Image: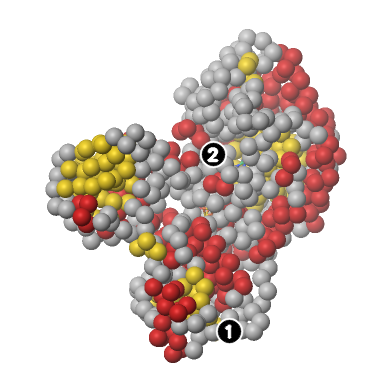
Amino acid sequence: MTDRAEEPDPVPDDHGFPWLLAPLEVGPVRLANRMVLGPHGTGMAVGGSFDEAAMAYIEARVAHGVGLVVGEAHHVVPIAGQTYPNGDASTDACIEPLRRMADLCRSHGSRYVGQLYHEGRARMNSVDGSRELAVAPSALPDERFHIVPRAMTTDDVRAMVANFGTAAGRMAAAGVDGVEVLVGMGYLHAQFLSPRTNLRTDDYGGSPEARQRFLAETLAAIRDAVGPDRMVGFRIVPEDHDPDGLRLEDSVPACVAMAEAGLCDYVSVALGGTHTLSGTVEIVPSMFVGAAAVRPTARAVRSALADCARPVPVLAGGRINQPQDAERTLADGDADAVVMVRAFIADPAFAGKVRDGRADDVRACIACNQACIGHRPSGHAVSCIQHPETGRELAYGSLAPADPSRRIAVVGGGPAGMKAAAVAAARGHDVVLHERARRLGGQALLAERLPGRAEFGGIVDNLAREVAAAGVDVRLGSDATVDDLATDGVDAVVVATGASPTLPDPSWTEGARVCTAADVLDGTAEVRAGERVVVADWRCDWIGPGVAEVLRTDHRCHVRLCVNGEALGQSLQSYVRHQLAGRLHAAGVEVSTYLRLVGADADTAYLQHVITGEPVVLDDVDLLVVSGAPRSRTDLLDGLAAASIEVHGVGDCLSPRTAEEAVLDGLKVGAVL
Ligand SMILES: Cc1cc2nc3c(=O)[nH]c(=O)nc-3n(C[C@H](O)[C@H](O)[C@H](O)COP(=O)(O)O)c2cc1C
Ligand code: SF4
């Protein structure tokens, strides 16, 4: 039973968040509150340690009163090359940067835990582009990276335990408040715990207790290295989505065993597993995964720990993006502290807003995965499509007041225009925002109509709130022309008129019924129930798959999605893409890749294989839906330039890209006007 009998110690002015704001004792350390900035590779650990940008990134968050920071995963053994820049505790070079980071957190009343891990067979890094030798408990292939590891010898296992102890010693020398092992998400310690990936017959496999031994010895080595005055914990994913993999019946007893043996001061529960693609989608769960999805497994762990001889606090995180969800997780007894990552990426001031009674102003993460985890493959710093200041704190952390204050018109109330208007007005300019439609939002309003993507509309609500808070004069239904703006006598105009969906040249599709994906979504296209539809998807983003799903599930059409790329959703973050693939498979949409649309007539769509150039002819087509390249709306931009009015373009009117670039353009222009 985890429902709480007790109440937290009263916190003055808790603004309805008594649990989130309550202090928490974790082993020998007291946390000022229960909001934890969770572990995440920021892409800023240059050469394995933290530079000024990384420090500024963390400071922008801890300055608002986070109880605990868990640092990004640090390697315990040297790896010669890193696909992603990650922390590295395999040499003494980590000590000084970690010392500065831990001191920084403490200077703001927070605490800092260093995280250690070894990925085992989930080896994505390479020395020189060649595949590195991966090790694991057993020589079993994984389904994500398609690696067959080498099975560790018993001596290898003992040496690895020692590596964790040595790395923890470095962290202790740096003055961290604790050390955590990343067990979960399918890394080496999870590979030992799981009956599917550990088929060993030595002391480290064979029975549940033997499979736990590697973790137990690692925690003991860490405790030896860090002493009694620092926290020792581990982060586990109790259900890993691997068929026959780690389940509650193995993971919960492992948590209890570690706690009862006095080996840990806390257990942290997370989501996701790297063994399979279905597990990866929960590592950083997108908006297709329900809010606060971590709660049931956290509850199972906390409930078992509550009944054991030496209960320890449970930290839990995964898809908790709102203060209210975080508070409920604690109040209902599912966890003792809430670990959040993207909530703080999207809103650095999250904790301060909770503390100051401004929880409704939180810019909630919309779980699009675009600019945070979406930046990982390219190795760039994490950012946020809603708040591009994230990861750019040195450049945009504080903006200079407008000098002089000027009259600025922004034309176009999509994400680019809203951001430009909000930033310019917050700096002290007098800003009018003209939007032709009756609602702010632009193309984001269409995006939120796609199946499972309603949360995307949050970007509109959040930016609209920033526009209002900055005092922008918003004029809806206002179609500002060059003449209007010239007559108004504005000092400068920001043009954010976006881009329009396009159709192929009509001569290509004579006799065919053709419409754009936007026409289907906004209801202007006539779609007959049960008809046969081809969706020709040049964009390779979420629109083609989304509209295909709408046609299949809402209109009961027979749908063939023809993608001009190597995979559906090729341009999307992989966890989002995998889930789209799963949804389309479940809906019964037929997907073909490498196809370019070259024409259509009354009942046929003509495509071409983009590699061989061979024709691919699809018969019995009633409707062709095109998700094609948009065309920038440049008329106003060109007209203002010709009229010698100071003009700045932002977003898709310059070149059609995504909401991420639109909002970033808005920031860049709003910051310099
Ligand atoms: C950019 C990024 C990097 C991450 N790196 C780590 C990591 O180093 N260690 C770890 O335990 N989890 C890592 N995670 C997973 C997060 O800790 C967290 O479990 C996940 O983002 C879900 O929580 P959220 O919904 O609060 O974002 C990372 C997540 C993101 C977005
Ligand atoms: S980019 Fe999307 S998922 Fe990432 S923090 Fe921002 S809103 Fe959340």
The residue closer to the viewer here, 371 or 204, is 371
Q: What residue is drawn where x is 38% and y is 49%? A: 539
Query: Seen in the image, is 111 located left or right of residue 190?
Result: right
Position of 499 with respect to 177 (left or right) is left
Q: Quadrant of the N terminus?
A: top right
Q: Secondary structure at mark 1?
A: loop
Q: Dot 1 corresponds to which residue?
A: 406
Residue lying furthest top: 201
Q: Residues within 10 Å of mark 1 (few under 14, many from 20)?
A: some
| Image: 484 above or below 384 | below
Tell me the amino acid under the disc marked 1.
Arg
Earlier-in-chain disc, 2 versus 1: 2
* Circle 2 crowding by C-alpha within 10 Å: few under 14, some 14–19, many from 20: many
- Cβ at disc 2 under 8 Å from ligand 1: yes
Which part of the image, by quadrant, shows the C terminus?
bottom right
Instruction: Find disc 2 in the rendering and name its residue.
Output: 283
Residue 428's x, y, as percent?
A: 61, 80
